[in-house]
Image: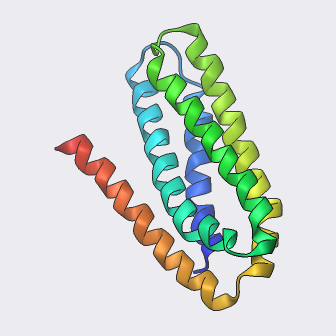
Amino acid sequence: MNIFEALRESHKIQRELSEKLIQTSGDSTERRELFEQLKNELFAHAVGEDRYFYIPLMMTDSGLNITRHALSEHHEIDELLEQLTETEFSNHGWLVTAKKLSEKVHHHLQEEEHGFFQQAGKILDEKQKESLAQQYLAEYKKYKQADKDSLTG
């Protein structure tokens, strides 16, 4: 598996969770659970992606600008997650912000998969793509497990 395939697996989960989240209403258990799942998925993905995809690309001249743009979008997503965390689930504005988050996530994933990945594919060699995938997946799974542990323990 290469880094692009590994990242796409989480992208699929992010799309599904964000689409389900904006279909919820009020202060429901479903809304709370989906939001926590999406927040955890985005966090685990971003940590691994930042460390084992973006940072190695930032070390190259040709990867610097595209990486900076992607990292700024991660920051925007973090800010929307923070707004949602601080807003009551029953507040009408919560769903408005959740829709902005869903749109931002979909936009970011689209940009990555249909632009950034192609550019990164020219920068990284095959061995790097496989090595980064292994490192990313280990980091991603570590944070996913930490989220499960915090929910159960």
Q: Height in image: 77 above or below 92?
A: below
Question: Residue 19 appears at what percent x and percent y?
Answer: 62, 36
Please say whether residue 77 is visible from this viewpoint: yes
Question: Residue 125 appears at what percent x and percent y?
Answer: 70, 88
Q: Nearer the viewer, residue 58 or 93?
A: 58
Please say whether residue 113 is visible from this viewpoint: no
- Number of residue marks: 0
Quarter-of-image position of residue 77: top right
| Left or right, 149 with reference to 79 | left
What residue sits 63% from the left and 82% below the top?
129
The N terminus is located in which quarter?
bottom right
Structure colour scheme: rainbow
Question: Residue 83 appears at what percent x and percent y?
Answer: 53, 23
Q: Nearer the viewer, residue 1 or 44?
A: 44
Q: Height in image: 1 above or below 63?
A: below
What residue sits 47% from the left and 40% below the top?
39
Q: Nearer the viewer, residue 142 or 31?
A: 142
Q: Residue furthest left?
A: 153
Q: Height in image: 128 above or below 153?
A: below
Quarter-of-image position of residue 142: bottom left
What residue sits 47% from the left and 75% below the top?
135
Question: Residue 104 appears at what percent x and percent y?
Answer: 70, 38
Q: Nearer the viewer, residue 34 or 144?
A: 144
The C terminus is located in which quarter?
top left
Q: Height in image: 95 above or below 127?
A: above
What residue sits 79% from the left and 60% below the top?
65
Q: Residue furthest bottom?
A: 127
